[in-house]
Image (tube, grey):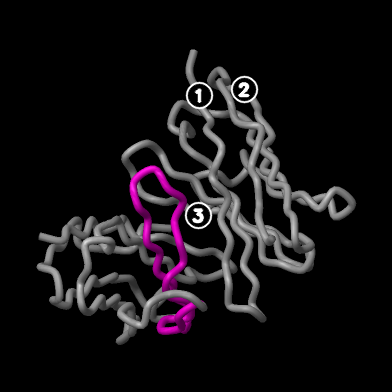
Amino acid sequence: EVQVVESGGGLVQPGGSLKLSCAASGFTVSGAGMSWVRQASGKGLEWLGPIGGNANTVHPESVKGRFTISRDDSKNTAFLQMNSLEIEDTAVYYCTAWFEDLKMEVWGKGTTVIVSS
Amino acid sequence: QSTLTQPASVSGSPGQSITISCTGTGSDIGAAESVSWYQQHPGKAPKLIIYHVSGRPSGVSARFSGSKSGSTASLTISGLQAADEADYYCNSYAGSDTRVFGGGTKLTVL
């Protein structure tokens, strides 16, 4: 079964760091278009960036310089490194995988990050 | 990037058709045939229902259809059912390999 499972969320103080993981099964992360999306409670979706087959990444202005997406092909896992966290970063963080050839997209159940003192 | 503009809410009766608009600019929706739509039920992860403006993933009902004209994309749901009540989000290519979501639309089935 093709699936992704996020982990690593939790409570962190403002200014702190957290690294989220997205473990893939049923496919290789290097062969899919992986992305991260977040959603604050009661709010809309916010795209955080992709990591494609060539491992290139890009981020929106809201998190540029603070968030970095990477992947470890040997662990078949994508990551979201979050630094200098702000209260406004409190949200559910989702990992997604897009398969261009199958025209199919898989989402995880999300992991919750709470930034609070 | 700014979010794409969607109506906050739409409603319709069972069996009717509704359309949700998603307005952007020539730098996002108008720049490429790369608009997606997502359905999200409360407490659940979003689900892709339309890709590449009008493509429908396997398993998604043909009652869902997408289109685009200039810088505005649209999602039409025909034959409304109670199970369609959810939040809907558009997502578009926004230049320089970035993407952007719309603010979301709450669909109420009366």
Q: Are marks 1 and 2 in contact (CB under 8 Å)?
A: yes
Front tag of 1 and 2: 1
Residue denoted by label 3: A47
- A43 versus B64 height, above or below: above
Residue at left 29%, top 75%?
Answer: B75
Q: Main secondary structure of the magenta part?
A: loop
Task: Depth check: give the residue in front, A1 or A37.
Answer: A1
Q: Secondary structure at mark 3?
A: strand
In the rendered image, residue B101, in percent from the top left (x then y), is placed at 41, 60
Would residue A47 appear left or right of A53 to someone viewing this image? left
Tell me which amino acid carries mark 2: Gly
Would residue A114 appear left or right of B2 to someone viewing this image? right
Residue denoted by label 1: A115
Residue at the right extreme, as displayed: A74
- B21 versus A88 height, above or below: below
In the rendered image, residue B56, in percent from the top left (x then y), is placed at 45, 80
Q: Are marks 1 and 3 in contact (CB under 8 Å)?
A: no
Residue at left 50%, top 64%?
Answer: B99
Q: Quadrant of residue B62?
A: bottom left
Q: CA distance from mark 1 to mark 2?
A: 8 Å
Q: CA distance from mark 2 to mark 3?
A: 21 Å
Would residue A97 appear left or right of B98 to someone viewing this image? right
Q: CA distance from mark 1 to mark 3?
A: 19 Å
- Chain bearing tag 2 is A
Q: Are marks 1 and 2 on the same chain?
A: yes
Residue denoted by label 2: A16
Q: Are marks 2 and 3 in contact (CB under 8 Å)?
A: no
Q: Identify the mark nearer the N-term, 2 or 3.
A: 2
Q: Is residue B46 magenta?
A: yes
- Chain bearing tag 1 is A
Q: Which residues are magenta?
A: B32-57
Residue at left 89%, top 52%?
Answer: A74
